[in-house]
Image (cartoon, grey):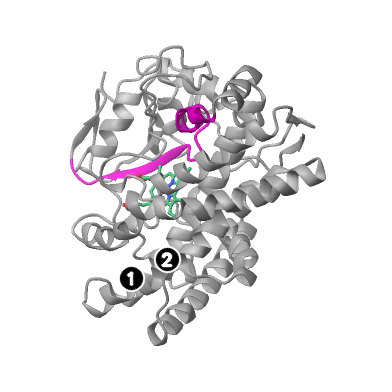
Amino acid sequence: MEAETPSPRPDGDELFNPRSESFIRDPYSRYDRLRSLDPVHFDARLNGWLVSRYADVDALLRDSAMGRAGQRRFFGHFDEGGSIDLASRSWLLNMDPPDHTRIRRQFGKAFTRQRVESLRPYVEQKVDVLLDRIAADGGCEFVSSVAQPLPVALICMMLGVPEERHEICRDHSSALLPLLDPVISEAQQQRAEEACAWFLEYFGELAEQRRRDPKDDLLSALLPAEGEGELARHELINNIIFLFSAGHETTSSLLGNGLYALLTHPDQYAALAEDPGLAPEAVSEMLRWDAPVQYFGRRATADTKVGDRQLRPGDIVMGLVGAANRDPERFKDPHRFDIGRPDCQPVSFGAGIHYCIGAALSKMESEALFARLPQRFPGMRLVAEPERRGLMAVRSFKALDIAV
Ligand code: HEM
């Protein structure tokens, strides 16, 4: 069916209203409707296409006629010449080849499996300290006590950010998160501008220090690429900022969403407590079940097809990760949370050239936590029904009160 064909389908409001409370509570039944009624749906309010089938989302990510460059203004959340404008100019995710290939080659060196594995002992030790604290206190608010500090400590350690700066980096990184949403408030935008300005100055200074006195950290390791002309100075700093925010809130959401899924499926929690070796499969299922990043955006750079729809250059497309991950054509019994699911490969880290550079890192972190937590606290329970944060792109909880 062609895009122009009039149809009696429900309008966008009914099919996709990600800011409504009912959608935030349960996006998955809405995604089911969207996928079965109109899997490549034009949403007039967003002025873009919504893609909800697994096969279409995966193909879209690998389609070279779908670009990112020239769409820093994807949702237009910045002032020309302001700090977000400056910082986002060379974010990996906003670039197409050949610049994307060149920059990714440099940053990719920091995220090889070997390097990630070398960080495991640090993460395991950090996890033990956090779990000791929960044991001593008889419970905690999990988001602020574990889900946030763990990824922040790791990315700070990698970049060489000293401990006294962890908290301020975490706050500024969180302030950047609403930029991924199609609609943000003026206050959010203002706060994101301040956060970006702070990061530009802070990482600029840190890089200066490392130029004078290199250390064993990622920033120092990337500086030679700058000297060799592989990475311009602004590309280095801007992508360090992007790495921070891309690695922090996403992983933190995975830890929170994952724990909630386990605690609301006690048989799965018990299975993991019994056999911590299931942690890698459990983490894949958590990523599928309640993906931290719920969609990604692209813009067509040439005529191309998505599903059976013809798209034109300039068309905006949103791949709905949460919908793809519950597609019954790809996953048997998709609304069942099952940590023993075979062949569980959700699109939660994307695919194609922009496939998440930190996927192995965040999996390692999450596996380290979920291999330990259920075994140590077999009686862990939720104290109250938690509230969602209400952002659109990143799905997470405001707080998660637990007792052990
Ligand atoms: C559970 C945790 C994470 C999730 C769910 C996640 C999700 C994603 C997704 C979906 C993309 C592709 C977006 C697109 O194609 O439009 C992406 C890209 C990216 N992620 Fe992650 N991410 C996570 C953790 C991390 C970590 C820990 C880091 C680094 C410390 C990181 C750094 C990046 C970078 C740099 C890109 C851009 C890659 C490129 O454009 O080539 N992410 N991530």
Q: Residue furthest bottom?
A: 212
Of 263 and 378, which appears nearest the observer?
A: 378
User: Is residue 127 rendered magenta in the image?
Assistant: no
Residue at the disc numbered 1: 222
Residue 140 seen in the figure: no
On screen, residue 403 versus residue 159, left or right, reads: right
Tag count: 2
Of 53 and 344, which appears nearest the observer?
A: 344
Three-letter amino acid code at disc 1?
A: Leu
Res. 351 image quadrant? top left
First in residue order: circle 1 vs circle 2: 1
Residue 371 seen in the figure: yes
Q: Which quarter shows the N terminus?
A: top left
Q: Residue furthest top?
A: 333
Residue 213: % across, % down: 42, 85
Residue 176 lies, with reference to residue 229, above or below; the image says above
**Label 1 with label 2: CB-CB less than 8 Å:** yes
Distance from label 1 to label 2 (Cα)? 10 Å
> Which residue lies at the image location 24% right of the left edge and 54% below the top edge?
96
Label annotation for residue 240: 2
Residue 198: % across, % down: 55, 73
Q: Residues within 10 Å of mark 1 (few under 14, many from 20)?
A: some
Residue 275: % across, % down: 54, 25
> Which residue lies at the image location 22% right of the left edge and 71% below the top edge?
230
Give the residues in magenta.
Answer: 276-302
